[in-house]
Amino acid sequence: MIIKKIAKDKFLIRIEPNEELFDSLINFSKKYKIKSGFFIGLGATNEVEIGRYNEKKKDYDWFKIKKQMELANLTGNLTIKESHPYLHIHAVLGDKNLKTISGHLKKLTVFPTCEILFFVFDNKIERKYNKLTNLFLIE
């Protein structure tokens, strides 16, 4: 992972081929002692687990895709959940026929690259459990 601090509260991050997105961003947040922030990005993947929230189950339906996909849009935030860094990330992915899917990410292996602009928040943002949704939501 290549990290460049481009302003007091902004970083440009390039994630290397075959690195896992979530691991890379958590390691980045720990290295720079970042508690909360927002990021956008783009790139590509060769393996992803993406899903959607199922209101009836109050949980996610997950789908694994093991093929080359364009990462047309990556949007997410870093917050604190139960005293640990937590990533909430959504993506729009495109296949070789330019058909897109979108959803909530659980896992993403970068290939060949992923470029992220990360905005650091001054304050720590925490998540609390919400019984109605069975999710940890921003407090």
Image (cartoon, grey):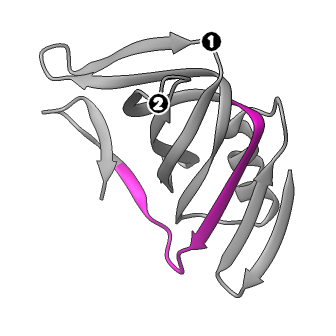
Where residue 127 appears, as percent x and y from the top left, is 38, 51
Question: In the rendered structure, which amino acid carries the disc numbered 2?
Answer: Leu
Q: Main secondary structure of the magenta part?
A: strand
Around disc 1, counting alpha carbons within 10 Å, would you say few (fewer than 14), some (14 to 19), or many (20 or more)? Answer: few
Where residue 27 appears, as percent x and y from the top left, is 77, 48
Residue bounds of the magenta highlight: 109-127
Q: For the point 14% across and 23% down, which residue is it?
A: 55
Using the rendered image of the protein, determine whether residue 82 is visible from the camera's viewpoint. no
- The question of residue 119 being in magenta is answered with yes
Q: For the point 49% across and 31% down, which residue is it?
A: 94
Q: Which mark is residue 26?
A: none
Can you name the residue that lies furthest to the bottom here? Answer: 8
Q: For the point 38% across and 23% down, which residue is it?
A: 51
Identify the image quadrant of residue 129: top left
Q: What is the secondary structure assignment of the residue under circle 2? A: loop
Relative side of 124 to 20, left or right: left
Question: In the rendered structure, which amino acid carries the disc numbered 1?
Answer: Lys
